Amino acid sequence: MSETLISSLAIHPGEMIKDEILERGITQRQLAAQMEVSPTVLNEVLNGKRPVSTEYALLLEAVLGIDAGIWLRLQIDYNMQLAKKDAILFHKLEKLRKVEDDTVKISAREHIFAAG
């Protein structure tokens, strides 16, 4: 298994959006109106109950001037952090990696015997 560090704190991009609008003195309702979206749905995004979708990322870019790709990459990073902490997925991945390792070893042996 790879030896990468995993942050113990997964931060949803909605938290960063909240920080941004707070810094700019914009309320959630004002942002929702500018984006022409439901204030309730926007609140759910900002509170991490919904993901930042491609549509929302583009709307945020139009209103805040921050590249949509940034919001989407933050969402992907968040999703990856959560997935890496999922015990069921972890065990499934470990099992699949073991099968792959065994398959690679068998394939390498077959290649050596065929070449010899």
Image (cartoon, grey):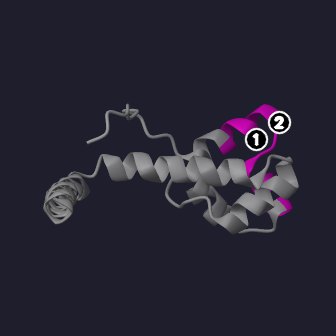
**In the rendered image of this protein, does residue 41 appear above or below residue 14?**
below
Q: Main secondary structure of the magenta part?
A: helix
In depth, the one of 3 and 39 nearer the eye is 3
Q: Where are the magenta residues, as a range?
A: 17-34
Q: Are marks 1 and 2 in contact (CB under 8 Å)?
A: yes
Is residue 33 on the magenta stretch?
yes
In depth, the one of 20 and 70 nearer the eye is 70
* Amino acid of disc 1: Ile
**In the rendered image of this protein, does residue 18 appear above or below residue 43?**
above
Q: Residues within 10 Å of mark 2 (few under 14, many from 20)?
A: few
Q: Residue at x 38, y 49 (%)?
A: 82
Q: Dividing the image into 4 quarters, which one contains the C terminus?
A: bottom left
Residue 22 location, quadrant: top right
Residue 45 location, quadrant: bottom right
In depth, the one of 11 and 104 nearer the eye is 104
Q: Position of residue 84 (x, y in %)?
A: 33, 48
In depth, the one of 28 and 80 nearer the eye is 80
Q: Residue at x 27, y 52 (%)?
A: 86
Query: In the image, 105: left or right of 31?
Result: left
Query: In the image, 58: left or right of 52?
Result: right
Q: Which residue is mark 1?
A: 21
Q: Dividing the image into 4 quarters, which one contains the N terminus?
A: top left
Residue 81 location, quadrant: top left
Q: Position of residue 4 (x, y in %)?
A: 37, 34
Query: In the image, 49: left or right of 109?
Result: right
Tag 2's secondary structure? helix
Q: Hey, which residue is sitting farthest front in the picture?
A: 116
Q: CA distance from mark 1 to mark 2?
A: 5 Å
Q: Which residue is mark 2?
A: 24
* Amino acid of disc 2: Arg
